[in-house]
């Protein structure tokens, strides 16, 4: 197998996701965190790109094919975290826009490419329909053998406004956690958040105190875990633009949470759609090895020059 880049912390492959995954060893990664190109969002100018399929059904089938190989590569106790955004059907037979409208991918607003002859079809739906791509994909992966454990809502407090007047503006995306086994590595304590003052006050009035093993109960720990609260399935995280890229990225805080909870310490994280290396930055920052795959060589170079260079320099310091 040829490598685009490899050192003791980071391995990058240049190529198609499914084809490259087919060459990786069974159970060789501990966690997968990724945000694939969204359906019909933009033209990346690379042959074989995901997201340019002729219908939502074909797009979902392509995703399933990639993650079928990824499932083999994932350790039995591993987790998959999949970020997907949705889109609407447009006019002119496709859901690529007319050059004015925007869609969100991974936190950035990007202008849709103009309608063209090979623009994706609407799957038989009339214009202005929400396609429901994330849930189509989640159900398809479930049917293919994955266990769907969580739907996390990524709420974007600073989402860009949309110039629509006949529906509500979009302020969220989906993040699904899937597993290949019923038993898997998951460390909720690594991502707990501080208890709100109001929660502490309410718990202090509870009749039955909670005490962690080996500790005495006190007012502050009554009814609550001493390490903090479960962050729940709605994550309010601001989008963060990445000036070095003309394509979309998601904020590092998202893969950080996924990796801290879903990847054992010292394990290996995979992103089959590596892009600017956001997942790789989060992995190396927290002492995990990283394997990235991307079809676009320019993106791999960009990730090495920026995010991955930063992460490797700080390898393990925040773990």
Image (cartoon, rainbow, N blue to C red):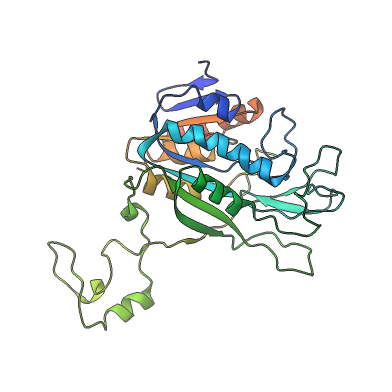
**Image quadrant in which the C terminus is located:** top left
Instruction: Tell me where residue 26 sits by quadrant.
Output: top left
Q: Residue at x 75, y 31 (%)?
A: 45
Where is 278 relative to 237, above or below?
A: above
Residue 316 position in % (x across, y down):
36, 37
Residue 234 position in % (x across, y down):
49, 62
Instruction: Tell me where residue 206 sits by quadrant.
Output: bottom left
Residue 90 position in % (x across, y down):
81, 53
Q: Say if residue 316 shows up in the picture.
A: no
Q: Residue at x 65, y 56 (%)?
A: 132
Residue 113 position in % (x across, y down):
80, 43
Residue lying furthest top: 2
In this view, the residue in front, 199 or 122, is 122
In-image side of 68 versus 122 (left or right): left
How many labels were placed on the picture? Answer: 0
Q: Residue at x 78, y 45 (%)?
A: 121
In this view, the residue in front, 59 or 193, is 59
Where is 302 relative to 235, above or below?
A: above
Q: Say if residue 269 shows up in the picture.
A: yes
In-image side of 137 versus 282 (left or right): right
Instruction: Tell me where residue 30 sits by quadrant.
Output: top left
Q: Residue at x 46, y 24 (%)?
A: 24
In-image side of 18 versus 76 (left or right): right
In-image side of 298 versus 206 (left or right): right
């Amino acid at each position: 197998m040829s490598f685009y880049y490899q050192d003791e912390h980071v391995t990058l492959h240049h190529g198609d996701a499914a084809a490259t995954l087919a060459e990786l060893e069974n159970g060789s990664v501990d966690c997968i965190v990724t945000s694939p190109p969204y359906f019909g969002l933009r033209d990346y100018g690379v042959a074989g790109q995901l997201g340019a399929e002729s219908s939502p059904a074909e797009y979902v089938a392509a995703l399933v094919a990639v993650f079928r190989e990824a499932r083999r590569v994932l350790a039995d106790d591993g987790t998959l975290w999949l970020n997907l955004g949705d889109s609407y059907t447009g006019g002119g037979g496709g859901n690529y826009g007319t050059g004015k409208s925007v869609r969100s991918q991974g936190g950035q607003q990007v202008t849709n490419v103009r309608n063209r002859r090979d623009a994706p079809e609407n799957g038989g739906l009339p214009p202005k329909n929400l396609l429901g791509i994330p849930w189509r994909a989640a159900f398809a992966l479930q049917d293919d053998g994955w266990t769907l454990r969580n739907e996390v809502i990524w709420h974007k407090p600073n989402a860009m406004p949309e110039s629509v007047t006949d529906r509500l503006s979009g302020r969220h995306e989906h993040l699904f956690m899937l597993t290949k086994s019923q038993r898997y590595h998951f460390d909720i304590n690594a991502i707990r958040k501080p208890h709100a003052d109001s929660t502490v006050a309410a718990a202090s009035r509870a009749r039955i105190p909670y005490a962690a093993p080996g500790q005495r109960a006190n007012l502050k720990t009554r009814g609550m875990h001493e390490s903090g609260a479960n962050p729940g399935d709605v994550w309010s995280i601001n989008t963060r633009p990445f000036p070095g890229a003309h394509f979309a990225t998601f904020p590092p805080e998202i893969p950080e949470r996924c990796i801290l909870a879903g990847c054992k310490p010292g394990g290996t994280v995979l992103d089959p759609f590596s892009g600017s290396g956001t997942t790789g930055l989060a992995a190396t920052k927290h002492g995990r090895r990283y394997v990235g795959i991307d079809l676009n060589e320019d993106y791999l170079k960009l990730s090495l020059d920026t995010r991955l260079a930063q992460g490797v320099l700080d390898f393990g310091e925040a773990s």
